[in-house]
Image (cartoon, rainbow, N blue to C red):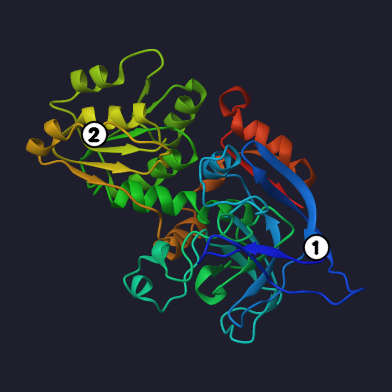
Amino acid sequence: MNNIQSVLSDKTGTFELNEILKPGITRATMKGLVYGGPGIIELKNIPIPEILEPTDAVIKILKTTICGTDLGISHGKIPSVLPGTTLGHEGVGVVDEVGAAIRNFKKGDHVIISCITSCGTCEYCKKQMYSHCEDGGWILGNTINGTQAEYVRIPHADNSLYAIPAGADEEALVMLSDILPTGHEIGVINGCVKPGDTVAIVGAGPVGMAALLTAQFYSPAIIYMIDVDQNRLDLAKKFGATHTINSGKEDAVKKIMSETKDGVDVSIEAVGIPDTFDICQNIVRPGGHLANVGVHGKKVDLQIQKLWISNITITTGLVNTNTTPMLLKTVTSGKLEPAKLITHHFKLDAILEAYKVFGNASKENAMKVIIEP
């Protein structure tokens, strides 16, 4: 069985065999971080992926990173990820091989890997709801093998990769795989941030910081950043937050309600736990928006009996990455500087240490880590 590459089927949730090798034939191997079940992740030698469909591309990873969702997977928070899956859904790389149907990319091209795979032709893709693509969506590092490896296979590559302009900072562009479009689309756009607004972002992690950076496109008057990590709050000030609140030391709801007329226009939840959602629903003013970005692993207490009469709009969502091309232009022009979010660098051989550092972000002063072969 060592010479059979297994990947997870996004259709059935069961293992499928990509190919059966003839006796005596072996596949070249690479290093990849493999999920082994709750609490188990291992750097292993696994087969290098191959083209399975004409619309595939195989990408040699140059730089990848760790997402808070990956931490959740490692703790068994996301049941769709089965043991044996290579983790990771972010990265930049160079095209190593393309399928016969690929038109937009060729071997040697440098590309951003989108966290969302899009066929481009299904009903949802035609609505730009790429996260619900009928043959894609969030599958990398979830239902198929992901980017925390030396190579990755990208289905529907023409629609799921973005060409990197010559001379661009590829390390910074890793942030365009996921966190920047997530913070922008699910936090800022869904929250309808507009000029003059008062905005509160609850959670100063990478996605919260991405919401902070992109909210400034729309000229809000005030941006509160709320977190329990003072180091992250200090960083948020440098990134454009006008006010910070350490919710581990003071009551964030009372402070905001005392400093505003009747709450904030937009509250953005960027953690994914009941306590932070509760803060958001208690600080949004009548007619305001609560944009939930955080990945929740259990139910929250929704105070609908208070919210309904205040004309509150609540939105949730998984990133579609339809704003990635625009964000790429803002980064390459220097208007947006996501490289500021990078705090640590690791080699792939040290990825387990990278997980420890990222998982202990407060102690390590970690924001985004870059991992390269």
- Between the C-alphas of marks 2 and 1, the distance is 48 Å
Which of the 4 image quadrants contains residue 18? Answer: bottom right
Q: Identify the element where label 2 is drawn.
A: loop
Residue marked by disc 2: 302
Q: Residue 350: percent from the left, percent from the top?
A: 77, 40
User: Hey, what amino acid is under mark 2?
Assistant: Leu
Q: Which residue is mark 1?
A: 1
Name the residue: 74% across, 65% down. 5
- Closer to the camera, 35 or 115? 35
Q: Residue furthest left?
A: 309
Q: Is residue 10 left or right of residue 241?
A: right
* Secondary element type, mark 1: loop
| Crowd tier of the residue under label 1, counting other residues whose Cα lies within 10 Å: few below 14, some 14–19, many 20 or above | few
Q: Nearer the viewer, residue 366 or 303?
A: 303
The quadrant of the picture occupied by the N terminus is bottom right
Q: Please tell me in which quadrant of the rendered image residue 363 appears.
A: top right
Quick check: 241 above or below 36? above
